[in-house]
Image (cartoon, rainbow, N blue to C red):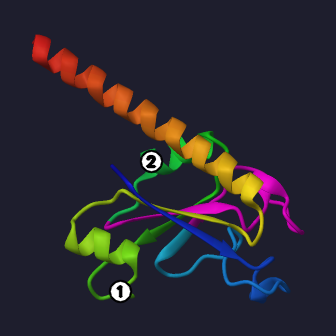
Amino acid sequence: MPYLALHSNKEGHLKSGGSGTVSIRNSSRNVHAFPAGTIKTGHQKGLQDEDSLIYLAGKMIDRKRIEQFNAAGLHVKYETVTTSSSNNSMSNYIVLQKNRADYINIEVEHGDTKTQKKMIDRIIKVLKERERKIGQRENLSAKL
């Protein structure tokens, strides 16, 4: 079962004239952006909004996982976590202390609950599909 977190942020990013600190358009040394396609700027532009994204975290970038969420129309920011780069956030704690990479932080522009609900639905769909595939592999290996 994944760890889910819900957050909201202000419109745009400070570095590009917005008032927030989160955007799919910005990356850092440890946080890499993987847009799902078109990126829109402006007030509450839905799933394509620069402020609508999910954060994933792990010790190494998981391209397959990123591709699954991108295919569902979700922008992804992936944080690579090491003991030296840890900021003591929940995602870093889960990766380093629980040795798990199943943290998903759902970010939307403040007040955009419609998009947040869409994102949650898509995440659940991706997770169910992953579980279904795991179940199929387990059944196949049990038959062998």
Q: Which residue is mark 1?
A: 88
In terms of depth relative to the viewer, which is nearer, 48 or 89?
89
**Crowding near pointer 1: few (<14 within 10 Å), some, many (20+)?**
few
Q: Label 2 is placed on what type of residue?
A: Arg
In terms of depth relative to the viewer, which is nearer, 84 or 90?
90
Q: Which residue is mark 2?
A: 65
Q: What residue lies at 35% left-to-right and 76% top-to-bottom?
A: 92
From where the camera sits, is residue 81 visible?
Answer: no
Q: Label 1 is placed on what type of residue?
A: Asn
Q: What residue lies at 31% left-to-right and 67% top-to-bottom?
A: 59
Residue 45 appears in which quarter of the rendering? bottom right
For numbered disc 1, what is the local secondary structure? loop
Q: What residue lies at 21% left-to-right and 67% top-to-bottom?
A: 98
From where the camera sits, is residue 122 visible?
Answer: yes
Magenta segment: 33-59
Q: Which mark is residue 3?
A: none
> Could you tell me residue 70's position as x and y percent?
60, 47
